[in-house]
Amino acid sequence: MRYIFKNASLSITRNKGRNLLIGILILVISCAVSVALAIDHASAALIASYEDKYEVEATIAMNRENMMQNFDPENREDAKADMNEVFQTASSITAADIEAYADSDYVKSYYYTMNTEMNAVSLEKAEQSMAGMPQQKRGDQEFEEMASGDFTLQGYSSLSAMNEFIEGSYQIVDGEVASDFESDTCLLNEELATLNDIQVGDQITLVDPNDETITYSLTVSGIYQEQSERENGMKQFANSVNTIITNAHVVEQISAASESLRVSITPTFILTDSSVVDAFSAELSEKGLSEYLSVQTNLDQVESATSTIANVQTFSVTFLIITFIIGTIVLLIVNFINIRERKYEIGVLRTIGMKKSKVCLQFISELLIVSLLSLLLGAGIGAAISVPVSNYMLENEIASAQNEQQSIRDHFGGNGKEMIPDQGEMPEQGPDTGKNNFQGVIELQAFNSIDAVVDIQVVIQLLGIGLALTVISSLSAMISIQRFSPLTILKERT
Amino acid sequence: MENNNILTMEHVSYRYKDAKQNEYVLTDLNFTFQKGLVYAIKGKSGSGKTTLLSLLSGLETDYEGNIYFRERELRQFDLDRYRSRDIGIVFQSYNLLPHLSAAENIILSMNVSQYPIPDKKEKAVELMKRVGLSEDQKDRRVLKLSGGEQQRVAIARSLSYEPKLILADEPTGNLDKETEREIMDILVDLAKQEQKCIIIVTHSDPVCKRADVVYQL
């Protein structure tokens, strides 16, 4: 058997021209394949890393589709009453419900934010600093029929829930956040504190807007500032100016004392991975989640942010398939021509008694040796060129996304900077704020370079593809060897 | 009494697969070939000489009748092994591999036969000398050898695993008279000294004259 490989290597070294041609062909194919594989791997790793970094978050939100199905435009009064009922249902979710929902195999951790409207004794409400700009209403206030308070009381269940602080849009300028999440403490906006001359350590008394006999005292543990200053130095109206921040325990206590107080609760569940979203949603329905509420996730946001890379990945896979098909066809043709030229050799080997299988083995061995050398060389060259090629591809993607960004700005008139600031200027938004409507464009800056690396996995895949290519393209040789009659070949030559 | 028959043809007929019912190339051949003798099978072009050689070498088995090699029907043989171990074949156009040297062509044949040879290189040189080639020609590519030298290499190759039967298809067809005589000397010598059976398919009268037995097609 050893002589077959020796004969194959002799044939390669003594027929340099022929093997060089095949080698160059395989080299070109392997370069292309290794670049495509490297880009594919790097893209997949980037997407996985992004998905790891930005965990799959699920929240419970209104299912507008279901709500609108029950809306009867002919009977507006009834419809309004129905809608009110829906909001009652939505509002009726309690911290205990959240806890029950979170008791799931699909949930890694959870947190929630509770909001309500309160008045306060001897605390003057800060007025809007920008004239003509209506104060933002909370989602479910449109149907509020009860008296609303001057202040928004926002209670967080844990540090994880405090997205604004984590992302830096709120920042403590005095005092601190009480980390026990149980004490009767609160944080005031700097503007509100200044207006009312309140210091850290002072007490404020909250009053139920529907029943002034119900009060609740909180100690100010910190003063925070909303980071909303623009480049031009103009201070924008801070949404949070009349927001008093406390913990969820306090809001629960207040809510328990007052039946008339409307409390909205926004839970966030950190899911184990993106594949469990449907199962988690089904589980919540089983646990009694209203049909007007549904599970919403940040998957679209994650997908939007990774869409650029996903495009590059799709392109690389398509390129890989096309290269493989074209490579196979070209190699099949070259091998077919090659075998026709070597008919005489086949005839001689068969005449001296070499079995067809051994002749096949020798020819395939020759192709394998040439392929292997070319594949390894191709992997090396591919490793060198895959990084600039992939970054070049990404560069184009970023440029086209920037054009898209400019185009969106143009739609809004002016310079549109209020809605879509330049990259780098955009204050980071939490995944559940709903303010960031242009994630795909803005998040693009996260991927301005791909570390496309031809690692051992790529080399193994490349070898696998190369071997498959070699075997497929050897088919012409194998079929020819089976069909050739040695004596006919030798007679033709004579 | 010792049976000297190496190859026996009994009522052998052959027609091509696409030929008509009665269009036989070879009809009812009954030849016997013994060791130590040189046989010439003579015939004009198209008389079926090469076809007969393909039957005897096991390259074609679709014949009628029987061919026995040492009393065993050829169809029962592993014919690849039969060609690589039991018979040697010499062609008019030498049929050597051009990318190999003279010695490498001979050694390749030894390897294919899997015949136990302790030192193949030494044996190759010995065979080359046996057919009148010098040792310094062993590393020369066969295309750089003359026609006569190439035919000598082909004969040396056919002897490399010591077969008892040598089939030669017009072995001197491409050679001049002098070289033809030298090649025939080698073949006759192999029959007489080494008791090999030499079957030469030819249309050459000088070759037939050197043969012990001539069969006409």
Image: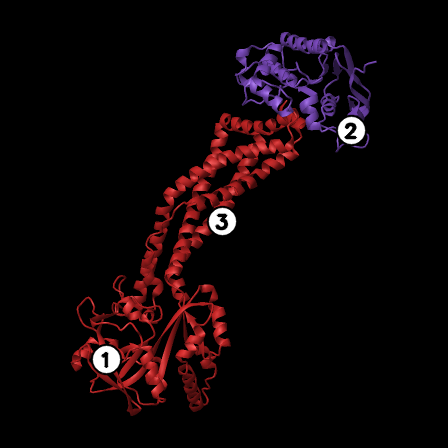
Chain colours: A red, B purple
| Percent coordinates x, y for residue A213 in the rendering | 28, 92
Residue type at mark 2 is: Tyr
Q: Is residue B71 left or right of residue A321?
A: right
| Percent coordinates x, y for residue A301 in the rendering | 38, 65
Callout 1: residue from which chain? A
Q: Which residue is mark 3?
A: A321
Q: Residues within 10 Å of mark 2 (few under 14, many from 20)?
A: some
Residue B199 versus residue A104: which sits nearer the camera? A104
Residue type at mark 1 is: Thr
Marks 1 and 2 belong to one chain: no
In this rendering, the answer to whether A9 lies above or below A197 is above
At 18% from the left and 71% from the top, the residue drawn is A234
At 67% from the left and 30% from the top, the residue drawn is A485
Q: Is residue B148 visible?
A: no
C-alpha separation, residue under disc 3 versus residue under disc 1? 66 Å
Q: Which residue is mark 2?
A: B63
Quarter of the image for the C terminus of chain B: give it. top right
Tell me the SS state at disc 1. strand
Residue A180 versus residue B40: which sits nearer the camera? A180
User: Based on the displayed image, in which of its 4 quarters is residue A87 positioned?
Assistant: bottom left
Q: Which residue is mark 1?
A: A219
Task: Return the disc, 3 or 1, that comes first in the chain's sequence.
Answer: 1
| Percent coordinates x, y for residue B36 in the rendering | 74, 12
Callout 3: residue from which chain? A
Quarter of the image for the N terminus of chain B: give it. top right
